[in-house]
Image (tube, helix red, strand yellow):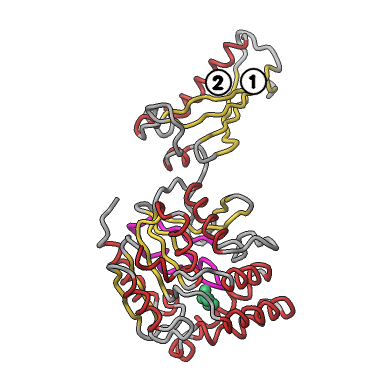
Amino acid sequence: MNEAAYLELFERARWEALARGPGLDLFRRHGVWPAARRATADYLLPAFPGDVLRVELETEKLGRTSLELHQRATRIRDGALVAELQIVFVMIDGEGKPIPIPPEVATVFGGRLTSRPGELVRHEVGDVTLAVDTRGDGPALLLIHGFPLDHSLWAHQVAALARWRRIAPDLRGAGASDAPDSGYSMTTYADDLARLLDRLHIERAVVAGVSMGGYIAFEMLRRHRARVMGLILADTRADADSAEARQSRDSMIEVARTQGAAAVADRMVPRLLGRSSQQTQPHVVEQVRAMIGRTPVPGIVGALGAMRDRPDSTPLLPTIDVPTLVLVGAEDELTPPAASRAMASAIPSAAMTMIPGAGHLAPLEAPTAVTRVIAEFLEALPRP
Ligand code: MLT
């Protein structure tokens, strides 16, 4: 077999893999075409008539618009590697312009984008890897947790909002995501999430944030407005820290550095949860304590600095032109209902709902009520 024959063999193997799996029209159905941009072939041994070869195909790298495949041809008789090919494709549209790889195509080529219950998928987003709970199909709903918590704050909503593609990441420095020593600000959190949407091939999402998640949602509006098709602001506020609040961020940084995450949990749990939850839901108290206890100290310190230095988002409110839901626990002492009311009234056409019996972590303290309110809001949105 000469070199041209090997290339033909590899190409035929790729098409046969498509025919056996998703169908030969995989690309056409999505209006895309994989254009080969670079290939490196190694011919290691000659093959002769009568030699039977096995061709294996592996995805080496799955980028936003590009796909790198590795093919190996081995001789069945003795397992010897006879040739291999490394080939990079760029997904192009009808005009030859690179476009994001459609989710189905990405899934076919091994880039599993969806997690199974109880499992997180890790996605590289620039200089960090985020652990992400992502489930289901439909329009995207990005669920951003608060401080010093993780994606499980949204567990009930992730499990229940079945008609939506739910994406609940651990932010940098939280849960199972990377926790670098530096690089924390509202800007980096928002950029990480925009990159995560890129990675998942999502153009636009409804963005929901609890507390610090809301501060990040504001930053996404400032930096990535085109990605936001709706907004859910839960137990959060628009104004920046007062001088006193900034000082208490610095004391909490000191506590985290010198005494660790458990000491932060001791101070925060009584403030995060509403009176009713503290009296009647001991399992929630334990869950929140454990969640904070797992948060890496660099992530706690980083988030406190990022919140301390965040800009005032009040001037943004009148410019918000996507459907917005404001919700708040009636017993929220950190971002009390009055702050939510003021925020909702400054956003044109925002609706506000108060959740009885819940404090600052309403999605976890009153999961059924919060899920119902969010489901009603989502169902009323025009489907993209
Ligand atoms: C949060 O829940 O994210 C924080 O309590 C917000 C804050 O401290 O400002």
Residue at the image point whose x is 45% and y is 64% from the top:
218
Q: Position of residue 130 (x, y in %)?
A: 58, 56
| Quadrant the N terminus occupies | top right
User: How far apart, in angstroms, are the residues tagged by discs 1 and 2?
Assistant: 10 Å
Q: Is residue 184 above or below residue 330?
A: above
User: Camera-side residue: 55 or 227?
Assistant: 227
Q: Is residue 58 above or below residue 336?
A: above
- Element class at badge 2: helix
The residue under label 1 is 41
Start-end of magenta stretch: 144-170
The residue under label 2 is 10
Q: Is residue 310 above or below residue 229?
A: below
Amino acid beneath label 2: Phe
Residue 158 counted in the magenta span: yes
Q: Residue furthest right?
A: 258
Q: Position of residue 133 (x, y in %)?
A: 50, 59
Q: Earlier in the sequence, mark 1 or mark 2?
A: 2
User: Camera-side residue: 80 or 369?
Assistant: 369
Q: Position of residue 28 (x, y in %)?
A: 36, 29
Dot 2 crowding, Cα within 10 Å, few <14, some 14–19, many 20+: many
User: Camera-side residue: 74 or 298?
Assistant: 298
Image position of 381 (left or right of 332): left
